[in-house]
Image: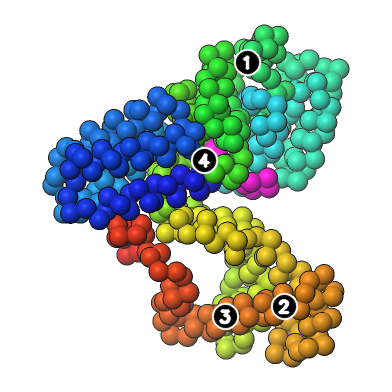
């Protein structure tokens, strides 16, 4: 997400960081570049104009004159204005009502609405510890009802059956009554995809809204449509009282125009952001964290949350005990680490959240990709139990057999064994005294130069505090 914008802004802001002081002239030339970067990212023109005006006003004022580090101060202003453009803080769902809290989902066809219903249901169940019922009132597509039923089973929430012979209002009311009887906390109503210019379809959802009085009306929109996403959301909001936005397919949006335009154009907050197709790929939208990602400073807090939620703690403790006892790190352990990484969205997703990795990820994409992780897992699965426990016995004949069994080449097996050896050394350092410090310095040595923040801009704001903790 935001790869193009991050790359462009990183270069622009790096140039100004080399200045001894900020003048109106160098601020003007930098802001010209920032303006172009935002327009190329498909950010709506009114948003760009207001953003540039606000940054300029703050940059040529007292904030910069008083600082000893003009480049860092300018970066901080840009970061602050990006946060303001997106809404400053995360606005969570309002569930403060007599149960069940009814959530109505609206959006265009193909925006990922039904999948978002399942993702949101899973998030509410696992994170908020709520009981959830999902129901589809899409009487035009039997496949949509079946899809929601399948997804509900996958995320382990209750599904209320419906069919195309019923009316949307009747289906929704019946589901709400059922939830009341079973003391279910939240009901999520999935609706048919519709265009705001379709009068009949808009009348249908307006009537449905009036009949069930949802506490939240969420508009699901595809991030890859850029500023059009904001314009579509605005058009819907004029006919339906939206309370928030769910931005889907953000992992495929290299520009970021939708995320930066929606709040300004609609006046409604982005509450969640979809970062992949899997049912766990929905995150609360935090403007400060997204601004940090855009500026290539990573998103340490989201990474920590991922680690807490998705890492198998029992396996992690088992490995820690094993290493502490001096037992070696083997290929079985290596495979477990690969699987854990996949559960967190893969290497690419993790890299985006690490400070300094934003501007590096584009250059590394050819070398670091999640398909390589899948291939490594297949290669390890093609080994015998003995080979996984004692990798040193894997020589010529065994390599050929493993390559054939995994549908790969011998050089792929060699590459995996080399990466495993590096990981093994790192784990050995980690298990000794002062292990974490040694491991971090080893990892730093493996990274390209200039990875510590934004070029010459020093430590990104906020990260120094994190390091002290």
Q: Position of residue 98 (x, y in %)?
A: 57, 26
Q: Position of residue 201 (x, y in %)?
A: 70, 13
**66 relative to 247 in the view: left or right:** left
Dot 1 and dot 2 residues touching (CB under 8 Å): no
- Relative height, residue 85 to residue 374 (above, below): above
| Residue occupying the point 67% across, 65% down | 373
Q: Position of residue 404 (x, y in %)?
A: 84, 75
Dot 1 and dot 4 residues touching (CB under 8 Å): no
Q: Quadrant of the C terminus?
A: bottom left
First along the sequence among labels 2 and 4? 4
Q: Position of residue 346 (x, y in %)?
A: 62, 58
Of discs 3 and 4, which sits in the foreground? 4
The stretch drawn in magenta includes residue 360: no
> Quadrant of residue 211 in the image?
top right
Q: Is residue 135 visible?
A: yes
Q: Distance of mark 1 from mark 2, alpha carbons?
A: 55 Å
Q: Which numbered dot is residue 422?
A: 3
Q: Secondary structure at mark 2?
A: helix
Q: Which numbered dot is residue 411?
A: 2
Q: Distance of mark 2 from mark 3, alpha carbons?
A: 17 Å
First along the sequence among labels 1 and 4? 1
């Amino acid at each position: 997400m935001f790869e193009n914008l991050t790359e462009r802004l990183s270069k622009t802001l790096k140039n100004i960081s080399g200045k001894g002081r900020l003048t109106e002239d160098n601020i003007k030339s930098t802001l010209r570049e920032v303006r172009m970067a935002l327009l190329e990212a498909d950010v709506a023109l009114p948003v760009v104009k207001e953003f540039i005006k606000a940054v300029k006003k703050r940059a040529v004022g007292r904030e910069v004159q008083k600082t000893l580090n003009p480049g860092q101060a300018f970066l901080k202003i840009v970061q602050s204005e990006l946060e303001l453009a997106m809404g400053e803080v995360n606005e969570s769902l309002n569930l403060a009502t007599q149960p069940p809290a009814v959530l109505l989902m609206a959006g265009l066809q193909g925006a990922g609405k039904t999948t978002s219903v399942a993702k949101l249901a899973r998030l509410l169940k696992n994170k908020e510890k709520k009981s959830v019922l999902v129901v589809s009132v899409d009487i035009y597509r039997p496949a949509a009802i079946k899809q929601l039923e399948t997804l509900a089973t996958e995320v382990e929430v209750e599904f209320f059956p419906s069919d195309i012979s019923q009316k949307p209002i009747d289906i929704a009311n019946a589901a709400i009554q059922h939830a009341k009887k079973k003391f279910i906390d939240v009901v999520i109503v999935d609706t048919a995809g519709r265009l705001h210019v379709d009068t009949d379809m808009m009348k249908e959802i307006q009537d449905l809204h009036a009949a069930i009085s949802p506490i939240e009306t969420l508009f699901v929109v595809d991030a890859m449509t850029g500023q059009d996403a904001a314009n579509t959301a605005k058009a819907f909001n004029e006919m339906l009282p939206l309370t928030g936005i769910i931005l889907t397919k953000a992992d495929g949006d290299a520009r970021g125009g939708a995320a930066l335009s929606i709040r300004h154009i609609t006046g409604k907050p982005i509450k969640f952001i979809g970062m992949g197709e899997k049912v766990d790929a929905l995150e609360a939208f935090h403007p400060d964290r997204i601004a940090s990602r855009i500026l290539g400073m990573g998103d340490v807090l989201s990474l920590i949350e991922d680690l807490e939620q998705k890492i198998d703690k029992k396996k992690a403790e088992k490995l820690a005990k094993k290493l502490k006892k001096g037992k070696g790190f083997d290929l079985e352990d290596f495979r477990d680490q690969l699987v854990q990484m996949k559960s967190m969205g893969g290497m690419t997703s993790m890299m985006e959240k690490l400070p300094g990795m934003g501007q590096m990820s584009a250059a590394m994409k050819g070398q670091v990709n999640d398909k390589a992780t899948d291939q490594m897992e297949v290669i390890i699965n093609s080994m015998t139990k003995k080979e996984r426990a004692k990798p040193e016995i894997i020589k010529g004949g065994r390599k050929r057999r493993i390559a054939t069994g995994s549908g790969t080449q011998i050089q792929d097996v060699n590459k995996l064994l080399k990466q495993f050896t590096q990981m093994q050394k790192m784990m050995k350092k980690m298990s000794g005294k002062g292990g974490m410090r040694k491991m971090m310095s080893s990892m730093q040595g493996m990274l390209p130069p200039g990875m510590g923040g934004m070029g010459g801009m020093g430590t990104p704001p906020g990260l120094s505090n994190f390091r002290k903790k």
